[in-house]
Amino acid sequence: MSINSIQFNEPDYNIDKSSNKNIKTQQTTELNSFEEDNLQEIQILDESSSNNEMQELERIHKEILNQLKQQLEIIRQEKQMLISQLAVAQDSESRESLISEISELNNKTNSIYIDIVKELQNYNTELNEIIIGTTQQKVEDSSFLQELQNSSNYNANIQSTLEGYNSQAGQKIAQSALTVRGTTGWCLAGVNDSLERVYGTGLYYHSAYQSIPELQSGQGMGAHFKEVSVSRDELPSLPPGSIVVWEPSEGHQHGHISIALGDGRESSDYIGKQMTSRDANYHVFIPIS
């Protein structure tokens, strides 16, 4: 049993949490193409299940998603009416007022879409908890943490850049990052899954690369990380819990973000070999608290 994800125009669209922070509002004189293209794509599979708990979970989340979808339809109708009025408005004062109202509706639309994605993520997380039978499938602390503590994977050259690295925090982040949703194209959402389990919050942006300023700022999630300079060759040798963020490049307009596991692998919404060769600039952040 599963809930269909929203089919965004871009395959690696990354949205999380109920916030419209840093989301660019589209032209106010046009219908929001994001809304128009995707309103009909919010669906839930009505698959039968012998598990009453799963059925109840699906019912609850389906109800929430339907309410959000209804809100989108109401906003769409309101915006169509305002755009029709804008087309015949003569004086500049009326036009400015209508454009302002349309812009406000665009912001509301973006916020609701973020709520929808978060709701889908909550469903998948809770379903996973039911299937596993525990809050999260845990790796034995004694073996995993000991493996990280004994790891000599990051070399002497990189150690010189790691002043302030908090190994305890790094180990917790890396351990959390072992649990992934098993998708692709949702790297920021996957990283947020891991960060939320450790810090109770994450990096809530439209695209992965937009998290760079916060991580650099010393505020929010940036209070727990410090940027360091690391060569491409050294990326697979990063210590556990380090975050690597790639800027946009051709074919990857949202960039990429991942958490280093400390063994040459990275974790986002899936686990794979540490990325090193993308034709883009990148930033490395180590946990300090």
Image (cartoon, rainbow, N blue to C red):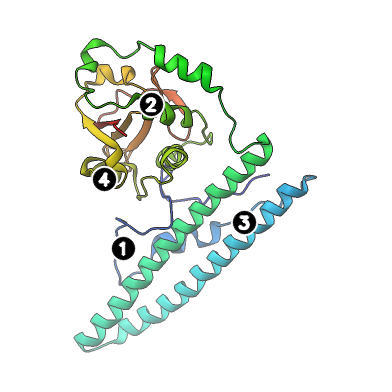
3 or 2: tag closer to the N-terminus = 3
Along the line of sight, the residue nearer the viewer: 122 or 278: 122
Per the model, the C-alpha gap separating discs 1 and 4 is 23 Å
Name the residue beneath numbered marker 3. Answer: 61
Residue 148 placement, left or right of 215: right
* Residue projecting furthest to the right: 50
Q: Which residue is mark 2?
A: 168
Mark 3: few/some/many CA within 10 Å (<14, 14-19, 20+): some
Circle 3 sits in a helix, a strand or a loop, which is it?
Answer: helix
Place of residue 199 in the rendered image (x, y in percent of width and height, measured from the top left): 41, 41
Image point (47%, 58%), residue name: 115
Label 4 with label 2: CB-CB less than 8 Å: no
In this view, the mark in front (4 or 2): 2
Dot 2 lies on which element?
helix
Q: Which mark is residue 214?
A: 4
How crowded pointer 4 is (Cα within 10 Å; few <14, some 14-19, many 20+) is rated as some
Q: Nearer the viewer, mark 1 or mark 4?
A: 4
Foreground pick, 18 / 196:
196
**How many residues crowd around disc 1 within 10 Å: few (fewer than 14), some, or many (20 or more)?**
some
Left or right: where does residue 73 sit relative to residue 103?
right
Where's residue 191, x and y in %? 42, 38
Q: Quadrant of the N terminus?
A: top right
Depth-wise, is mark 2 or mark 1 nearer the camera? 2
Q: CA distance from mark 2 to mark 1?
A: 43 Å
For the residues marked 3 and 2, what is the alpha-carbon distance in whole angstroms? 36 Å
Label located before the other in sequence (1 or 4) = 1
Q: Which residue is mark 1?
A: 26
Q: Residue at x 58, y 44 (%)?
A: 124
At horizontal 57% and vertical 28% (from top left) the residue drawn is: 138
Relative image position of residue 227 (x, y in whole percent): 22, 33
